[in-house]
Image (spheres, grey):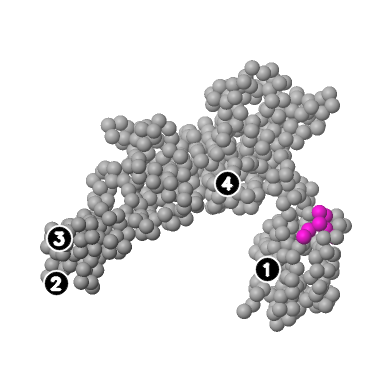
Amino acid sequence: MRLIPTKESLTVEFKSDISKYPDSEIFEAIVAFANTEGGELYLGVEDDGTITGVNNAHKNPITLSAFVANNTVPPISIRAEIIDEEQPVLKISVPKSYGGIAATASGKILRRQIRADGSPENKPLYPTEIATRMSDLRLLDYSALPVNEATVDVFDSLEMERLRKTILAYDGDKSLLDLSDIDLYKALGFVREIGDKLVPTVCGILMLGKESAIRRFVPTAQASFQVLEGTAVRMNEDYALPLLASIEKLIQHLDAWNPSREIEMGIFRMSAQDFSKRAIREAIVNAFSHRDYTKLGRVRVAVTDEGLTIANPGGFIEGISVDNLLTAEPHGRNPLLADALKRVGLAEKTGRGIDRIYEGSLIYGRLLPDYTASTNVSVSLFIPRSAPDEQIAKMIADEQNRLGRPLPINTLLVLNVLKDIPRSDIHQISDAVKLPEMLVRTILEKSIESGLVEAYGSGRGRSYRLSHTVYTDKQKSIGYVRQTDIDEARYLELILSLAKKNEFISRADVVELLHVSENKAYQMLRKLVKSGALTPVNKGHYAKYKLADA
């Protein structure tokens, strides 16, 4: 069995070693791996995957490991080993560099990328890309860098007034309102004191800069708003404004394209927009807060027939992926900017804005937000248009009113799984919401106590579904009753089948067969006795039963 991959990828590279591959180029390939995702370099394999063997000069893995460490900065600790195929191949495993940018001892800095044809290549990491790499690794806060060519004169007094009004409107840090403009600049990190001068930071210019200053010092800070109906473009605006003005403008635009619909809530009716206004605000703020300001591009908000897309340049930072968005510790690409947006009240104070984005869909039983279109160079959020599930919305609203507080995001996620996949077990739910089984079990038990969820069976066969209280309209109640009756009928058939194969059966036998509680087993046995299908042999907790005609 071949132990070597058959083709190259971002994390796999082949090098022919027939004529001794140059050591300097080995160092460059290793540096490129370290500055990307890490990977494996195979010496002795041609580009097409043909194994031709490692050169004798590279057959000592221990020597090579020391040689690499001495010729990379900081020293890269590789793992090298000889793999015995039809001819020996040297496998060099390179770890991803988390401590900064790696270089060869001669000063070359490279990274790996995928060409348009799908093949990998090593290319120089240019100075303009170094800041992006450092921020991805959380080693650099680009928004905190001083802009030495600027002075506080680039700040717009109208934007300062907008900032103060935002603090009042969104319940921001009221203590900031008592500060003078200069002290507020310092408190939010909009300036740095260098010598006897106050020098604006990138964050300061993004938040308060005049439009001319933004175009000059942070030209990447642009946004666009688009509306497409089918293939027709109904609206397409681009602008480079301070962040508060941009966020305000985008939200105003969206309001005009975000229709409402009425939801029945018992004797009451409530209005629900297609896209939760709170979720929209958090998503737009996140896009500006976490975007990569070293890259060209813009925060893009697009409304289509299918839904709403909010995208920004810059992929997920180190440690964040589509799979752990709701569970990873909150941290961003631009900590100073993110903190400023929290303190003025626009961003979620806990840093869990992603929870609010999901909550906006979950509380109405709608389709969930989707981040799967994100790449390593951009984050793209899609919120699909979907009608609210009135029964789910009512159930959640009633429970939140009873508690006097919102339901936790993890509880909402579990309820959403049970809405879509009735009769799920712990493993299925845990896999769907990407939470530990112990946490899911705790959520389910609390939900059962609250009357939101019902449990069936016991042990490993225990399954869950939403409470019958959810099914208040005729169509859904029919579905609930049908499912319940089918389960009951099937259980009775299985008990009778067991009785046919055994002279006697007991309550314990039914519990083991169906994974139900003892009380449930007793009720079903009594039902079969009452119908004449079974006959009790004796009475009490250890009663036995046999087929009536046996």
* Residue 135 as seen in the image, left or right of residue 302: right
Q: Is residue 534 visible?
A: no
Q: Which residue is mark 3?
A: 529
For marks 2 and 1 on the same chain, the one whose residue lies earlier in the sequence:
1
Q: Is residue 424 visible?
A: yes
Q: Residue flagged by tag 2: what amino acid is it?
A: Ala
Q: Report, in whole angstroms, how far the alpha carbon at label 4 lies from the one at label 1.
A: 31 Å
Q: Is residue 155 above or below residue 128?
A: above
For marks 3 and 4 on the same chain, the one whose residue lies earlier in the sequence:
4
Q: Residue flagged by tag 4: what amino acid is it?
A: Ala
Q: Is residue 545 above or below residue 368?
A: below
Q: Which residue is mark 2?
A: 550
Magenta stretch holds residue 9: no
Q: Which residue is mark 1?
A: 8
- Mark 4 vs mark 1: in front: 4
Q: Residue flagged by tag 3: what amino acid is it?
A: Val
